[in-house]
Amino acid sequence: MIDLQLLRQEPDVVRASQVARGEDPHLVDEVLDADALRRSALTEYETLRAEQKSLGKQVAQASGDEKQRLLAHTKDLAARVKALQADAEQAGTRATELARRIGNVIEDGVPSGGEDDYTVLEHVGTPRDLAAEYGPDFVVKDHLELGEGLRAIDTERGAKVSGARFYFLTGVGARLELALLNAAMDLALRNGFTPTITPTLVKPEIMAGTGFLGSHADEIYRLEADDLYLVGTSEVALAGYHSGEILDLADGPLRYAGWSACYRREAGSYGKDTRGIIRVHQFHKVEAFVWTRPDDAYDEHRRILAWEKEMLALVDLPYRVIDTAAGDLGSSAARKFDCEAWLPSQQRWMEVTSTSNCTTFQARRLGVRERTADGMRTVATLNGTLATTRWIVAILENHQQADGSVRVPEGLRPYLGGLEVLEPVR
């Protein structure tokens, strides 16, 4: 949730953030009005409560008509106190509900606009010219054709068992995913992360606390009979891990690497992305999640991006880094960097990693604080993808060879028993 103190002190900053996101800046004024009503009602409530206490002493000492007059006044006062308390609670509830509709205040420098208004920060590596390597008649195979040839991906049986956009990873496909995720976990361990296998079902208050039950709630699977949600990322469970706690960050950030299955409805997805395993309903991922002091969040964000780039170097993929525009951030993020790998079959860039600085937004909702010399304060959270199933798409396509085989990136070979080439199954 947005920091109400910031909202009161710097409303123009929050309004500007809302405008950059393409959201309603008038929400700021509605929150401030409700907050002012709450504080006014509370002030009057406290004044009348003090008068109530004073009257109680006077009633005890009075007698006759004076006592009856004081008792009548006390009764009237009690009704007014009760009404003011109700008014304050109602205004406070409205202020909170409205504040929850305001997205996190974006960092300075975040591009304004929507999905297509990102800024490209850098390109790393050069996409292969497959026609130059194998001749002008060479036809680039997409990941599904390659995966089927390797007997690594089976979408037909996935659909037979579970419906559209489900799949089986078999043979080298299953091994390739495990290799990726284990490599990601090894990188996390080298950098001080605690490895975790997280729950994939969470309570509504945890899902809401991370900011996922806003405008994109229709992307989330819900089990109505149990009132639980299936997570689309282990970020959700890891954010809830310390909910309601006071953290000790004296020795630096608390870093967790969450390995989990992830579920997304992918409502509204269409076109080429629905072929194969680019946009699916279930996948696996290793997610970096960090609790840190607010002052350290900016630098920690760059560190997570560097670890993502290290993983992409390990699998030898050409990619670019983009600074996501404000309107495409999601409500919790103040800034988000995506790494997009080259997709030869579609001649475009495809998102493979994302890292967000959520500042104090999630921790405030989840009640996570630290004790400092100046008292309690809300901490900051960050997250980022270290590896996920979708990477198989980019690995197969970028490392394909003319005969339908796929070269195994050198960095993954130790995780595949030294295997250098994935051969088609004839």
Image: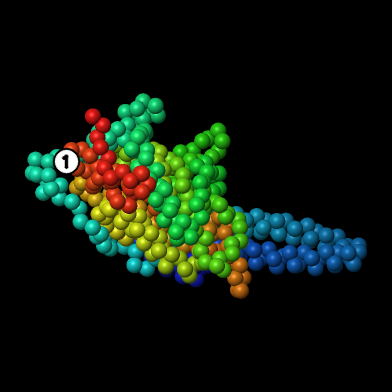
Q: Quadrant of the C terminus?
A: top left
User: Which colour assignment does the render follow?
Assistant: rainbow
Q: Examine the rendering and report whether any part of residue 268 can be seen.
A: no
Residue designated by label 1: 402
Q: Furthest residue to the top?
A: 160
Mark 1 crowd level (few <14, some 14–19, many ≥20, 10 Å Cα): some
In depth, the one of 15 and 199 nearer the eye is 199
Give the residue displayed 25% in from the left and 54% down from the top: 318
Give the image location of residue 21, x and y in percent: 36, 58
| Type of the residue with mark 1 | Ala
Give the image location of residue 11, x and y in percent: 45, 67
Q: Examine the rendering and report whether any part of residue 245 can be seen.
A: yes
Give the residue displayed 23% in from the left and 39% down from the top: 405
Q: Residue 137 vs residue 411: left or right?
A: left
In depth, the one of 131 and 425 nearer the eye is 425
Q: Is residue 29 above or below residue 223?
A: below
Give the image location of residue 325, x and y in percent: 32, 58
Q: Furthest residue to the left?
A: 136
Q: Is residue 216 above or below residue 192?
A: above
Q: Is residue 340 above or below residue 201?
A: below
Q: Is residue 248 above or below residue 271?
A: below
Q: Furthest residue to the bottom?
A: 373
Residue 389 image-quadrant placement:
top left
